[in-house]
Amino acid sequence: MKIRSLTKSQVEAEPFQVWNSFVDLIATEDYEVLSLDQQPAHLVFWYENEVQNGGHFQYFENHKAKHLKEAIEALGLLGAKCQQQVLREAGEIWLSRPRQQIETTEEFCEEALEGEFDSFDSRFHACSPNLQKVLEDYLSRNQSLFVEMR
């Protein structure tokens, strides 16, 4: 199992280092090398990151449907029922038809501006709690799975 390590004195001086180490682990490690307990946080982190940066269209364009089922399950596991429903429905739309390979930034922008996933983006942003809070709570309950104290 991959894990980040901090000293107790580091955490006492800079408590945010626990969060930073958590994010470093789930953002940089590949899904396949993470433990079964770490994988849900990884999937939720990347869903959050992509949707915040460019909406559901960007999420699907960058990840296709790879681990879509697992991401939907991860949202439920972490208690993000609202986002889970949004992703489930958006995923059905994404999978409902063949998609052209986007080759250029212009093609990406043109597709994104069609607004196919705009309603899902709005629903995602209306969900409460937001996914950062969900991830913070998951880390709080499972810190030893991500960060060890020496």
Image (spheres, rainbow, N blue to C red):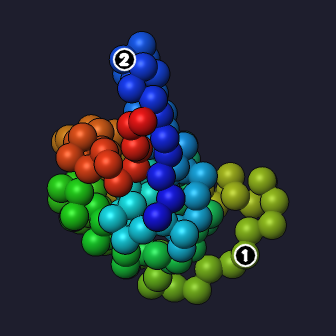
Q: Secondary structure at mark 1?
A: loop
Image: 59 above or below 12: below
* Amino acid tagged 1: Gln
Q: Is residue 118 visible?
A: no
Residue 4: % across, % down: 50, 45
> Which one is in front, 118 or 55?
55
- Quadrant in the picture for residue 76: bottom left
Which residue corresponds to the image point at 42% horizontal and 36% vertical from the top-left?
150
Q: Is residue 140 visible?
A: yes
Of labels 1 and 2, earlier in sequence is: 2
Disc marking residue 101? 1
On screen, residue 2 versus residue 108, left or right, reads: left
Distance in Å between CA atoms under marks 1 and 2: 49 Å
Residue 54: % across, % down: 55, 47
Q: Give the farthest residue toward the right.
A: 104
Which residue corresponds to the image point at 36% horizontal and 17% vertical from the top-left?
12
Total numbered labels placed on residues in the image: 2
| Mark whose residue sits in front, 1 or 2 | 2
On screen, residue 2 versus residue 127, left or right, reads: right
Disc marking residue 35? none
Which residue corresponds to the image point at 24% horizontal and 40% vertical from the top-left?
140
On screen, residue 51 versus residue 100, left or right, reads: left
> Which one is in front, 121 or 74?
74
Image: 8 above or below 136: above
To which residue does mark 2 refer?
Answer: 12
Residue 56: % across, % down: 47, 58
